[in-house]
Image (tube, rainbow, N blue to C red):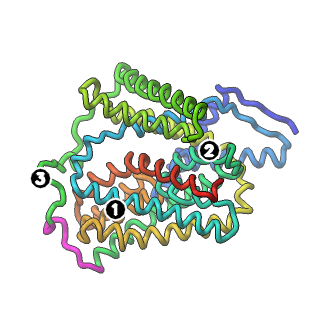
């Protein structure tokens, strides 16, 4: 066996190449565009297949430098924390609180379903966790982060990354497929009034025009970029230091990326509360998205696809069950608790999007419905607020809570 080692620079070139390959293929395949399959997922899977073929038929093993992997992952979760402005809660009012409670309920249900099926089929319950809220509501980023945790001691679940990426991709596609039909079913079944005849759920002080007519955006400059990079760097330093200290002096274990996420939240809201600095959300999002894309490119191009073969059946059963539960939950819980009106139907479509995939999928679902039936101001304000960062904060706590169950020890 001949081993080819890639240093940090060659590895970075490969990661970027994976992203460019994914973008090129997505431009040419309508299905991938329609369901918003991320570039690193498409390029990463192709790269993983290529690396596997080289390994099997050329007797050559490609090894990549992993120095950038953890910093990129931590930077992504820090950017989510820095985006969590609790003052934004005022924009959604009571409905935001109601929708957040509904969303949290699904997180618990997804984990109970995943663990229950895994136990019934006699496979590692960690597969149920990875097929639960980690990837269904968390997406590829959260899935890859927890897969790294589960691959290491004390869990030692070696196919964690393969299961996480397959589950997240399945969920992303499913979430994009079911959102529109669920909303249409609800609108027709309950003969819902059009938005023009319905009362707006939002307080009159909220101006929805900004969501329909984009305002002039602040430019990203070298100066502002350094400020945002400094915030991420400070949060990374404090978060990783706290993680090391807590691990060293206590028996309490919490993944490092969760510490970085919470430090980002504290830093953002501390600076806002004392008017010290206003976080440039769009710039932080750019840094976070670039970090996530590069991290996923590395994670996917280094997975072992053969690990999935033995786990295919139980994983498929778990994922199909999650899709069925999402549909039922959107119809009988999300729709009812959010008011049983047109806005509630759009909420249900959006919840299908990020309850199985990601916030962009939720937005596409809602745009598809509103393009046909009319705009929903409430949904387009509240769903992004919950899906963009509140869901990640709550999901981290829920996942950690489940890991204290006896079956994981």
- Count residues near mark 3 (Cα–Cα under 10 Å), then give few for <14, some for 14-19, many for 20+: few
Please tell me the numbered disc located at residue 218: none
- Mark closest to the chain's N terminus, 3 or 2: 2
Which residue is rendered at x = 29% and y = 25% of the image? Answer: 277
Distance between mark 3 and mark 2 Cα atoms: 46 Å
Q: In the image, residue 75 lies at what x, y percent?
A: 49, 33
Residue 189 relative to residue 405: left or right: left
Task: Identify the image quadrant of the N terminus.
Answer: top right
- Mark closest to the chain's N terminus, 1 or 2: 2
Q: In the image, residue 299 lies at what x, y percent?
A: 62, 43
Please name the residue that numbered disc 2 is placed on: 149
Please name the residue that numbered disc 1 is placed on: 368
Please tell me the numbered disc located at residue 204: 3
Which residue is rendered at x = 22% and y = 56% of the image? Answer: 94
Extent of the magenta region: 189-198
Against 147, residue 247 (above or below) is above
Q: How many marks?
A: 3
Residue placed furthest toward the right: 1
Q: In the image, residue 60 lies at what x, y percent?
A: 82, 40
- Mark closest to the chain's N terminus, 1 or 3: 3
- The answer to whether residue 49 of the structure is visible from this angle is no
Against 170, residue 288 (above or below) is above
């Amino acid at each position: 066996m001949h081993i080819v080692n890639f240093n940090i620079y060659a590895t970075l070139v490969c990661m970027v190449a994976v992203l460019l390959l994914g973008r090129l293929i997505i431009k040419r395949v309508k299905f991938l565009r329609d369901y918003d399959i991320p570039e690193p997922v498409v390029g990463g899977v192709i790269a993983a297949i290529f690396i596997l073929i080289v390994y099997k038929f050329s007797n050559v093993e490609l090894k990549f430098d992993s120095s950038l992997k953890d910093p990129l992952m931590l930077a992504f979760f820090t950017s989510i924390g820095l985006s969590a402005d609790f003052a934004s809660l005022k924009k959604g009012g009571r409905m935001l609180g109601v929708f957040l409670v509904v969303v949290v309920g699904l997180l618990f249900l997804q984990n109970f379903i995943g663990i229950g099926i895994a136990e019934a089929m006699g496979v590692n319950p960690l597969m149920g966790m990875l097929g639960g809220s980690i990837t269904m509501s968390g997406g590829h980023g959260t899935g890859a982060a927890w897969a790294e945790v589960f691959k290491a001691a004390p869990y030692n679940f070696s196919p964690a990354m393969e299961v996480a990426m397959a589950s997240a991709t399945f969920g992303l596609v499913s979430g994009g497929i079911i959102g529109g039909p669920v909303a249409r079913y609800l609108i027709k079944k309950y003969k819902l009034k059009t938005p023009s005849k319905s009362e707006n759920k939002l307080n009159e002080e909220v101006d929805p025009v900004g969501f329909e007519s984009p305002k002039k955006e602040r430019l990203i400059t070298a100066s502002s970029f350094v400020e945002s990079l400094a915030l991420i760097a400070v949060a990374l330093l404090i978060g990783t230091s706290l993680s090391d200290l807590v691990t060293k002096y206590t028996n309490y274990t919490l993944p490092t990326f969760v510490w970085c996420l919470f430090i980002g939240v504290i830093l953002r809201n501390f600076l806002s509360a004392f008017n010290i600095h206003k976080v440039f959300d769009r710039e932080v999002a750019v840094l976070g998205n670039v970090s996530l894309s590069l991290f996923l490119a590395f994670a996917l191009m280094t997975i072992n696809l053969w690990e999935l073969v033995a786990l295919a059946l139980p994983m498929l059963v778990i994922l199909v069950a999650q899709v069925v539960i999402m549909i039922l939950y959107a119809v009988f819980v999300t729709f009812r608790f959010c008011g049983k009106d047109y806005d509630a139907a759009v909420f249900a479509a959006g919840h299908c999007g990020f309850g199985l995939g990601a916030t962009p999928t939720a937005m596409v679902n809602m745009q598809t419905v509103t393009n046909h039936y009319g705009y929903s101001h409430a949904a387009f304000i509240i769903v992004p607020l919950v899906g963009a960062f509140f869901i990640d904060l709550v999901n981290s706590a829920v996942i950690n809570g489940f890991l204290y169950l006896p079956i994981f020890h």
